[in-house]
Image (tube, coloured by chain):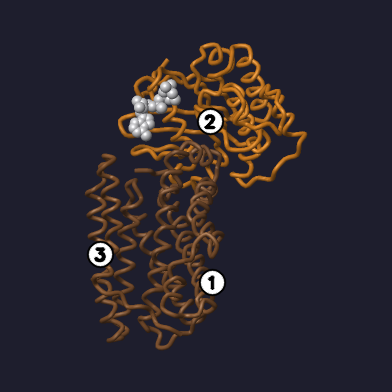
Chain colours: A orange, B brown
Amino acid sequence: MFCLRGVRYRDILDIERLEIPEGKVTCIVGESGSGKTTLLRLLNKLISYDNGEIVYKGRSLKDIDSVELRRRVVMLPQTPPIFPGTVRDNLLIGLVFSEKPLVGEEKLLEIMEMVHLDKGLDEDAEKLSGGEKQRLALGRVLLMDPEVFLLDEPSSALDEDTEEVVIGSLVKYAGERGKTVVMVTHSKQVARSFSDKIVEINHGRVVSR
Amino acid sequence: MKGIIELQMWQVAVAYIFIVILLFIVRTRGIPREKEILVASLRMTLQLVLTGYILAYIFNNSHPLYTLLAISVMEAFAIYNTYKRVKTPLSPRLREIIAVSMVTGTLASLFYFLLVVVRISPWYDPRYVIPIAGMLIGNSMTGISLGVSRLVDGMRTQQHLVEAALMLGATPGAASKQIVNASFDAAILPTINSMVGMGIVFLPGMMTGQILSGVSPLTAIEYQIAIMLGILGSVALTVVMSVQLGYKTFFNEECQLDLQ
Ligand SMILES: Nc1ncnc2c1ncn2[C@@H]1O[C@H](COP(=O)(O)OP(=O)(O)OP(=O)(O)O)[C@@H](O)[C@H]1O
Ligand SMILES: [Mg+2]
C-alpha cells in the first residue's frame, strides 16, 4: 500500500526501506522521540519529506493532491482533537471536513458502540474524560470510512480492558472491509495480539527484526 | 447662522491647565507616567499645528496631486501603524496583504462615498476628501489591527485543531473557517458597538465639529449617518479582505500548516 525508499525528513527520520501492506494491521513501536508520529505525518502528507520517495498505490505522494490523499488516508493524532460542540458534532465533523455525505442517528449510535462510548449524542464534547475524548476521536475517523487509518496511540488513555475491546472491534471492522491500519502503540499487548506486521523505529531508523 | 468663536492663542494656552492637573495627580500619587503624558501632549500639539498649516495650504491651493499625496501619507501611516499594533511578528506575505487590503478597501469605499453618496465636485476637493479619508482609514486601521491580531493568535493557539482538521481531509479554508470568522467578528464589533451608543452616549467628533462651526444639527446628523455607514463599509471591506487572504499565508502549496 505504502512503500518508502530512502526517505529522510530533517534529521528526525531516515528510512532506508519500508513496506506497509494493504488490508493489514501494521503496528509501529519504538521509544519516545524516535519518530513514530513524524512517520504518520509524512504518510498523511501533513509534512513533506526532503529526500527519497513515498509511493501510495503506485503513485508518488508528491503527485497526489494533499487534500485528496488525506481524505483517503485519514490520521488520528496523538492528542485527540475535540472541536467545540456536542458529541454528535464531533463525530460528524470528519465527514463535513472531507465533504462526504452525512449519516443518520442510527449509524452514529453504531459507531459509539464500536468505540465503547456510552454517552449521549447531545452532550458537550468538552466535558468528556480524556479516555472518552480519545474514543470519540477514534469514532470520528471510523465514520469517515477511509482506505487507510493512521492511528497515533489510539488507546494510550484507556485501561487495558477497554483498550482490548476498542482496538479489537476496530481491527475486526478494518478486517471485514479490507482496510489498512497503521497504528502507533506503546502497548506490547496490542502489538502482539492485533498486528500482522510490527515495525520498530529507533532514532529515526527502522530496526530490522 | 453664527460662525464659530475664533480661539486666541492665550485661550488655547489656558486649556493646558488640564495637563497640569493630570501631571499633579500622577506626581502626588507616584504613578510613573509623567514622561508619557508630556510626550503625548507635545506630540499632539506639534502634529496638529503642522497638520493645520498643511491643510490650510492644501485647501487654498486645491490640486488633485495634493489630495492624492495626502491620502497616500494617511494610508502609509495607517499600514505602518497596523504593523506596530499587531504584537506578533508578521510574515512578509501577510504584511503585503495588510497593505493591499487597507489601500483597496478604503479607496473603494472612499470614492463610492464621495462620488456616489455626497457627489462632490471636483472629485479631489480636499475639504471633503481629506477629512473623510481620514475617518475611513483610521477606523479601518483599527479594524485590520484587531482582525489580523486575532487571526495570527488563533492560528497559533488553535494550531492543533487546524492540523487535526487537515488530517481529516479539510481544505485549508475549512480548517481555519472558525478562526477567520472569529477574527472578522472581533474586528467589526467595535464599529457596531459605537453605532449603538451614537447620539445618546456621545456625539461623534465630526458632528460636534460641524455643529460648532454653525451647521444645522439636522445637516450634521445626515452627514454623520452617511459617514457612519461609510465607515462600516470600509471596515468590513478591509477586514474581510485581510483575513480572507491572510489565512492562506499560514498554509503552503501542499496544504500544510506553515507557521514558520
Ligand atoms: N516540527 C518539528 N520540529 C523540530 N523537531 C521536531 C518536530 N516534530 C518532531 N520533532 C522531533 O522529532 C523527534 C521525533 O518526534 P516524534 O513526535 O515523531 O516522536 P514519537 O516517536 O512520536 O514520540 P512519542 O512516543 O513521545 O510520541 C523528537 O525528538 C521531536 O522533538
Ligand atoms: Mg508520537
Whether residue A6 is visible to the viewer of this picture, yes or no, is: no
Q: Amino acid at mark 3?
A: Thr
What residue do we see at 63% from left, 15% from top?
A: A162
Which of discs 2 and 1 lies nearer the camera? The answer is 1
Whether residue A17 is visible to the viewer of this picture, yes or no, is: yes
Q: Amino acid at mark 1?
A: Ile
**Which residue corresponds to mark 3?**
B45
Looking at the image, residue A207 lies above or below residue B257: above
Number of marks in picture: 3
Q: Position of residue B235 (x, y in %)?
A: 47, 63
Where disc 1 sits, the SS reads helix
Q: Earlier in the sequence, mark 3 or mark 1?
A: 3
Looking at the image, residue A36 lies above or below residue B50: above
**Which residue corresponds to mark 1?**
B225
**Which residue corresponds to mark 2?**
A150
Q: Position of residue A4 (x, y in %)?
A: 42, 33
Closer-to-camera residue (B135/A71)? B135
What residue do we see at 29% from left, 76% from top?
A: B69
What residue do we see at 53% from left, 30% from top?
A: A150
Which residue appears farthest toward the right when viewing the image? A106
Left or right of B193 in this view: A104: right
Q: Check the residue under mark 2 and report the chain it is in.
A: A
